[in-house]
Amino acid sequence: MRIDDIDPQRADPSALEHIIKSLAAHGLSGDGPLQLQSHRLTEYATARDRLTDLSYFCNCSRKKLLGERLYPGYCRHKLTFAPEHAVRITADDKQRQFLDRHKGVFSYVASEHFGDFIIWRRDDVVTYHLATAYDDGHHHSHVLRGDDLFEMTAPQLFLMEKLGLNPPEYTHIPVLTFPDGTKLSKQTHAPALGIENPEENLRDALHLLGQQPPKAQFTVGQWLDWAVTHWRLEAIPHTLEPFSEGNYE
Ligand SMILES: [Zn+2]
């Protein structure tokens, strides 16, 4: 079990406890010691330093970049360390592709799709991209995650390639959204996942993912066994009905 807790502003010990408790209630526990990204900062810094030849320092303000979809490369000449600068990696023009097991083949050109992006923040914290690419490339064979993170895949694969890591196999599945398309999260004030009825939650999740679970009174363990036996990737819909309380009956 790995917890992505690198953003100091968002790392909240009580939230961490809640996540672990909630996963455990749904029968999901790690198969090794808990891994915290916040405990691997030295490794991420080493990874950053391995990318020195491809990266540069940038102190462009948000205001300066207003309206730019991609970073215009203003700081590409800044090759020596300077405090309070972010580190950006240089995107190239090579055509690449990857396979998503649910969405199919996706092609991209780094310089057109995401451009030079930040791998280390100006407040001296690793970015989500670098930490995730490093960990997924080192420790994971398969990544199954929400569609909302699909856009992250190409830049993360780009980093894995530059770090010489083996990319995992990717599957992105649709996530629950409100009728306006925003995803259910703490930021959008979605109700927290209750842990009083984990059996029902598991059945609802399987149903939403198109797996046609039976109308049965299974225990958590039985639901997980059923899911492992009957899991069909091709049955997952490409979008989900928007969330509203009580539309799961
Ligand atoms: Zn800059």
Image (cartoon, rainbow, N blue to C red):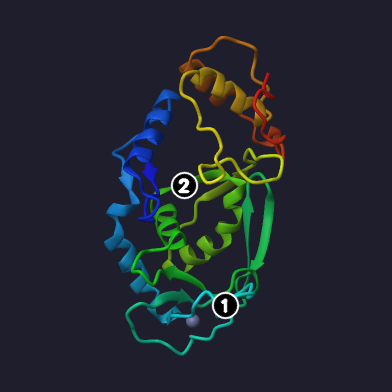
Q: Quadrant of the N terminus?
A: top left
Considering depth in this image, is 226 or 118 the residue closer to the camera?
Answer: 118
Residue 141, disc: 2
Q: How crowded is mark 1: few (under 14 residues within 10 Å), some or many (20 or more)?
A: few
Q: Which residue is drawn at 47% across and 19% down?
A: 196
Instruction: Choose top left, top right, bottom left or bottom right for residue 110.
Output: bottom right
Residue 30 in view: no
**Image side of residue 237 versus residue 98, left or right:** right
Q: How crowded is mark 2: few (under 14 residues within 10 Å), some or many (20 or more)?
A: few
Mark 1 and ligand 1: say if the CB distance to the nearest ligand atom is below 8 Å. yes
Nearest to viewer (mark 2 / mark 1): 1
Q: Is residue 201 left or right of residue 39?
A: right
Left or right: 45 as drawn, with respect to 181:
left
Q: Position of residue 5 (x, y in %)?
A: 37, 50
Q: In whole angstroms, how far apart are the C-alphas of marks 2 and 1?
A: 37 Å
Give the camera-side residue of 198 and 55.
198
In the image, residue 152 lies at what x, y percent? 55, 58
Q: In this view, does 75 lie above or below 25?
A: below
SS class, disc 2: loop
Furthest residue toward bottom:
77
Q: Say which mark, if any, is on residue 65.
A: 1
Q: What residue type is labelled 2?
A: Ser
Kind of residue indicated by mark 1: Leu
Identify the mark nearer the N-term, 2 or 1.
1
Q: Quadrant of the C terminus?
A: top right
- Whether the residue carrying mark 2 lies under 8 Å from ligand 1 is answered with no
Q: Which of 213 and 182 is in front in this view?
A: 182
Q: Where does residue 135 sit, x and y in percent of width and height?
A: 40, 54
